[in-house]
Amino acid sequence: MMKGQYNTTNTKASLSPNRTSLKTLFDLDSNNEIEEILSMISYCTSTKTLIDPSEFPSQQEKKGNMLSQLLTILRNTKKCIHVSQILLSPLMEMISTNLFRSLPPSSKPYSSFSSLITLDSDFPDEEDPISKLSRIWSHLQIVYDILMRLITNIDPHTLSSYINHHFLANLLNLFQSEDPRERESLKNIYHRIYSRFTFHRSFMRKSMNDEFLNYVFEMERHCGIGELLEIWGSIINGFTVPLKEEHKLFLMRVLIPLHKTKGMQGYHRQLAYCVSQFVQKEPVLGGVVVRGILKYWPLTNCQKQVLLIGELEDLVENIDPDQYRKLALPFCAQITRCINSWNSQVAERALYVWNNEHFVKMASMAIEEVFPMVVEGMEKNLKWHWNKNVQLLTQDVKLMLQEMDPILYSKCLDETQERESKALLADINRKEKWDRIEMAADNKTKTTTKSNYGFLHHQSQPPYICV
């Protein structure tokens, strides 16, 4: 072997990653720069609440500047970098120390309308909780960006010893934060981990399912259900057909019970999207979903009723037509009950369902069973409903039903009138019976009073008269 060739080989060996004590990071050229980064990481590992008056503003500002410098170094990296334990371990420790903290108690009492706190929430007589959280967020935002950079640029197997089950469980707990900006960052990071760390997918799905079930059956308060459902919507979109039994059980045991919670309005859009994805992939599941929603139908919450009516209408378009006949009666029965609701918004939304051609097709497939119930509901609205708009919409639906089957509609109308007359006659007979009972009771009371008075009067007379 020639000398020149030997020197070249030796030079390549000296540059080999296996022979280098510290792998290349952030395009650094000297150990001094590495020591400087380690010093910044060490300082940032100490937490600053930004609320404690004992903390000097200069300390808070210094930590913010150092976090920004670390993020700048990561952003300026031009190559796919392999991070050594010397820098990766302190970085992950710094991230864990800053993110995994005890969340403050809720600043807003539970509301049945929504369990979420949004940026436009009104808190009269109180400081906006988002403004309180913004002080901490100025640091947290940078830490989340650093974590996202590491997850995106570093090989998952290199990070596997740091992003483990314990790390993911702590990350999932942070979804209960009231700050929507933090939940948005968590959503992006958690979804990125799911897409890149394939060996953690099963654990992450199970952890999110446990979080949903705990919310439904235990605490009924969670700020991050909507964000978790958005992650699931992307996951469901990637499911292959036919669906696995595990995924069908998730639909039946987790997604459908989420319709019954008090705070459903806060995440209904994401929930409806997840459910519709299942039905689009396997239309046969439409029957299970419709029956499940009807099972958890709210009785007094009108806003939830309006949302669920819209969800059912959207589901009809994707349900397998072979199930139309089985679902027509329970579906139309619930819509008719909503049509007779005294809440005008619920009644109007239910009447608009009759404009959906898929729903009309479903009803027509069981017209003999559906029409008597629907006709009776229409006649009740026309006679008794207080809202004029509801009465006008009811009249339009009535004309449409008469065009569908005039003979059957007339027959059902006669039967409805006959039932009403019988019910009226039964009420009259019942009232007459009660009148006779009351009269007999009054007569008996009067007779008893007179006999008691005579007895008492006789007992009150003295047996002897003194002279």
Image (cartoon, rainbow, N blue to C red):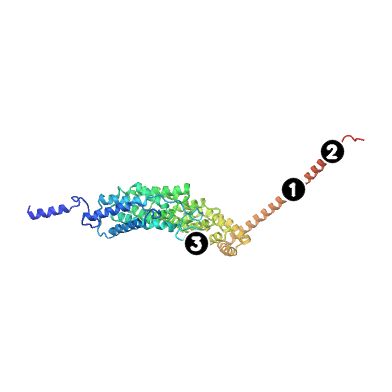
Residue that numbered label 1 is attached to: 438
Q: Nearer the viewer, residue 164 or 182?
A: 182
**C-alpha distance separating marks 3 and 1:** 56 Å
Q: Is residue 424 left or right of residue 93?
A: right
* Element type at mark 1: helix
Mark 2 vs mark 1: give the one in front: 2
Residue that numbered label 3 is attached to: 357
Residue 116 location (% of width, % of height): 46, 55
Residue 452 location (% of width, % of height): 81, 41
Whether the residues at callouts 2 and 3 have beta carbons within 8 Å, the answer is: no
Mark 3 vs 1, N-terminal side: 3
Mark 2 vs 1, N-terminal side: 1
Mark 2 vs 3, N-terminal side: 3
Mark 3: amino acid: Glu
Q: Nearer the viewer, residue 44 or 148?
A: 44
Residue 38 location (% of width, % of height): 27, 53
Mark 3 residue crowding within 10 angstroms, few (<14) / some (14–19) / many (20+): few
Mark 2 vs mark 3: give the one in front: 2
Q: Nearer the viewer, residue 32 or 196?
A: 32
* Element type at mark 3: helix
Mark 1: amino acid: Glu
